[in-house]
Structures are given as C-alpha cells and as structure tokens.
Image (cartoon, rainbow, N blue to C red):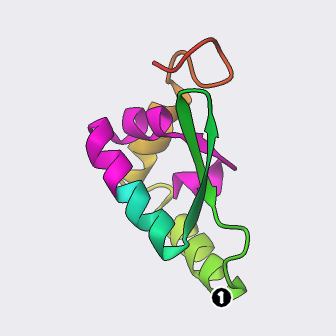
Amino acid sequence: MLLLRHDELCVCELTHALGAAQPHMSRHLAQLRQTGLVIDRREGLWIHYRLNPALPHWIRAILEQTAGGTEAVQPFAADVAALDSMPNRPGAQRCA
C-alpha cells in the first residue's frame, strides 16, 4: 500500500515505516520482485522499489481498491504516519 502512495521507496523507508528488520524486509521484497509485482533500482548503497509499471490494469485496480479501503485502518494508517515522520529520508545525505 505504501508503494501505491509513493512512487518509489528505499528499503530503509519500508523498514522504518513497518518496523521490520532489514533482512526480513529485503527477503519479502525479493519475493515480490521475483513474482513481477515490484521492480527495483540501485542507487549507491540503497535499493529502491516501486510497483511494476507493466502490471495488468486489473491488478493495479485491485491494489488501488485495497489501498482505498485500508488507508484509515490500522496498521496501515500507522505505517503511513511512521513513513511521513521518518528523519533522513533518501534524497538527504543518508537513510535513517
């Protein structure tokens, strides 16, 4: 849901927002990449993920409906708030 809200997120942003350990997050993102749901881009030490723009329209529609139905529900709302309050987000000198 965070990747729908933000065009692209660094692994460090996702770990901060979800409160997950980096190895755990990276493993799950690798699985999503293998299925073709997300694509990645390396920038120095950081790996950024985004939804695959080649996803079929019907998959994107399901994701958007799910996001719309969960945006005010926990833990999704807390994840958004955590990401929004993250210090040192990518684009600054380094991730938190």
Report if residue 4 lies within the magenta region: yes
Asked whether 11 or 2 is in front, the reply is 11
Please report the bounds of the magenta region as a residue range.
1-27
Residue, far top:
93
**Corner quadrant of residue 91:** top right
Query: Considering only vertical position in the picture, is 33 above or below 84?
Result: below
Is residue 26 rendered to the left or right of residue 69? left
Seen at 46% across and 69% down, the residue is: 34
**How many marks can you see?**
1
Q: Is residue 55 left or right of residue 95?
A: right
Can you see residue 1? yes
Query: The residue under label 1 is which amino acid type?
Result: Trp
Was residue 76 drawn as part of the magenta stretch in this picture?
no
Q: Position of residue 17 (x, y in %)?
A: 42, 37
When asked about the image quadrant of residue 32, the answer is: bottom left
Q: Main secondary structure of the magenta part?
A: helix
In-front residue for pair 69/41: 41
Q: Find disc 1 in the rendering and name its residue.
A: 58
Instruction: Give the percent coordinates (x, y) of residue 84.
Output: 55, 31
Q: Residue at x 54, y 32 (%)?
A: 46
Image: 56 above or below 23: below
**Mark 1 Cα shell of 10 Å, populated few (<14), some (14-19), many (≥20):** few
**Closest to the observer, 1 or 37:** 37
Q: Is the C terminus in the top left, top right, bottom left or bottom right quadrant?
A: top left
